[in-house]
Image (tube, rainbow, N blue to C red):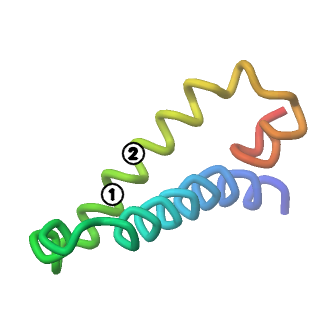
Amino acid sequence: MTKLLVPFVQKTVPALWAALVTWLVSAGAPGWLVDALAGAEAVVLAVAFAAVYALIEAVEPKLPSWLRAALVAKK
């Protein structure tokens, strides 16, 4: 079970953060930007996922073990 759960959490948590970041940006973005990106939600989400994942990997060594385990399922 753990062999399946850990990789799932490692990819799901950053994806959920990316979805949240995408939603927050679209909620506060000016109308012209929202209109320009209409239909490109998958691209925006992919870019946000890459940015969030890179940020998590960059700060991971500095995080306490409990937070590291929650974010990327690493001890």
The residue that appears at 52% across and 60% down in the rendered structure is 15
Q: Say which residue appears at 38% left-offset and 67% top-offset.
A: 28
Element carrying mark 2: helix
Q: Is residue 69 left or right of residue 27?
A: right
Is residue 62 positioned above or below 11 on the image? Answer: above
Q: Which mark is residue 50?
A: 2
Q: Position of residue 50 (x, y in %)?
A: 39, 45
Structural distance between the alpha carbons of marks 1 and 2: 6 Å
Vertical order, 39 against 24 (above or below): below
The N terminus is located in which quarter? bottom right
The answer to which image quadrant residue 66 occupies is top right
Residue count near mark 2 (Cα–Cα under 10 Å), binned few <14, some 14–19, many ≥20: some
Percent x, y for residue 67? 82, 40
Q: Residue, x 80% and y 48% (percent of image)?
A: 70
Q: Is residue 44 above or below residue 57?
A: below
In the visual, does 54 lie left or right of 29? right
Q: Are marks 1 and 2 in contact (CB under 8 Å)?
A: yes
Residue on which disc 1 sits? 46
Looking at the image, which residue is at 82% across and 42% down? 69
In this picture, residue 53 sits left or right of residue 48: right
Quarter where residue 35 is shown: bottom left
Kind of residue sitting beneath label 2: Ala
Helix or strand or loop: what does disc 1 sit on? Answer: helix
The quarter holding residue 26 reads bottom left
